[in-house]
Amino acid sequence: MKGILKESTIETLKNVKNIFRNIAIWTLIGGLVLGGFLIMFGGTDTGDIIGRIMGTFLVLGLAMLISTITISRLDSDKAFVQILALIGLISNFVWFVMWTICIWVTGPETVLTLHNLYSIATMFSILAIFGLVGACTLNMFEGNKKGIIRPLKITSVVCFGIVCLYNILGTFNSFGYHDSIFFGGNIIFAKQEELWARFSTLSAFAWVGWLITLIIAGINSSSEHTRVKKEQKKAAKLAAAQAAADAQAAAAQAAAAAQAAAEAKPATKSDDELRAEIEEKVRREMIEKEVRAKLEKEMKKK
C-alpha cells in the first residue's frame, strides 16, 4: 500500500493516463483534419459545426492537462493528497462529459434542461479544480520546516474550499435554482439575503487568505527544497571524494604489499648461472682433492 491506494492501482492509473493522452492527441489531429475538410468542402452551415468541434478540442485539452497533473499526485505517500487527487480525477471526467454534451446539445428537449447541464458541468469543473489545487498544495515539500509549512498548507486548502463552495452555490443561484433539487427548498442562500451576503464576504476573505497562505507556503517549501538539494549535492561530492581517497589508499596499500612480496621473494637464477655455480663447486672440490693428495704423498716420503 502507498497511502490509501495499492501500488498496482497507481501503476494502472498511470497507464490509463498514457492511453488517454494518446487518444486525445490523435483525436486532436483527426479533428483538425476534419475541420479543414469541412472548411474547404462543406456548405455554408458548417461554421456552427466547426465551432463545436473546436470547443470539444478545448475541453479535451483541458481535461487531458488536468488528468495528467492529477494522476501524478496519486504517487504521493500522503493519504489526503491521494483523496483530493481522486476527487479531482473523477470530477474532471464528469465535467469533460458534461461540457461535451453542453457543446453538442441543440435545444432543451432533453431529460435535463440546458441550464441544468451548465450548472452541473460548472459544479464538477470547480470540484476538479479544487481536487487539483488541493492535492498540489498538500503535496508541497516540507523538510525541516514541517511545523511552518504544514499549517499553511492546511489553511490554504480550507480557504480554497470555502471559495469553491461559494462558487458552486453561486452557480446554481445564477440560474435561478432557488428551490434546487440539490439543496432543498428553503435552505438555499439566495432566499436568505443577509446570510448570503455574509457568505460572500467570507468567500472574499477566504480568497485573500488562500492566496497569502499559498504564496508563503510555496516560498518556504521552495527554499527548503533548494536547501535539501544543496545538502544532497554537497554530501554526494563528499562521498565521491571519500571514495576516491579510499581507492587511492587501497591502491597504495596494494602497491606496498606487492613491493614487499617482491623483496621477500628470492631472485630467480637462469640456467647458465646455475651451471656456472655447479662447475665452480666441482672445480673447487677437485683442487681440494689434488692438494690433499699431494700433502699425503709428501708425508709418506718423510
Image: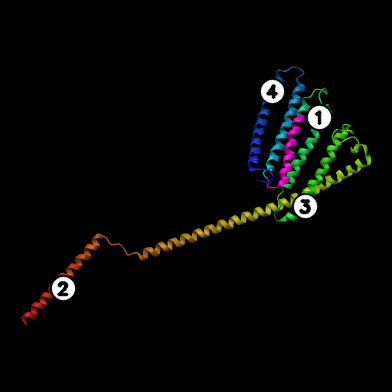
Q: Which element is circle 2 on?
A: helix
Determine the CA span between mark 1 and mark 4: 27 Å
Q: In front: 250, or 270?
A: 250
Determine the CA span between mark 3 and mark 4: 51 Å
In the picture of the structure, the residue carrying the numbered disc 4 is 34
In the picture of the structure, the residue carrying the numbered disc 2 is 288
First in sequence, mark 1 or 3: give its number.
1
Circle 2 packing at 10 Å, graded few (<14), some (14-19), many (20+), is: few
Determine the CA span between mark 1 and mark 3: 37 Å
Q: To which quarter of the image does residue 6 belong?
A: top right
Circle 3 packing at 10 Å, graded few (<14), some (14-19), many (20+), is: few
Circle 4 packing at 10 Å, graded few (<14), some (14-19), many (20+), is: some
Residue 35 position in % (x across, y down): 71, 23
In the picture of the structure, the residue carrying the numbered disc 1 is 117
Q: Which element is circle 4 on?
A: helix
Residue 117 position in % (x across, y down): 81, 29
Q: Which element is circle 3 on?
A: helix
Q: Amino acid at mark 4?
A: Leu
Q: Nearer the viewer, mark 1 or mark 2?
A: 1
Image quarter where the C terminus lies is bottom left
Q: Is residue 248 above or below residue 58?
A: below
Which stretch appears magenta?
A: 76-99
In the picture of the structure, the residue carrying the numbered disc 3 is 151
First in sequence, mark 2 or 4: give its number.
4
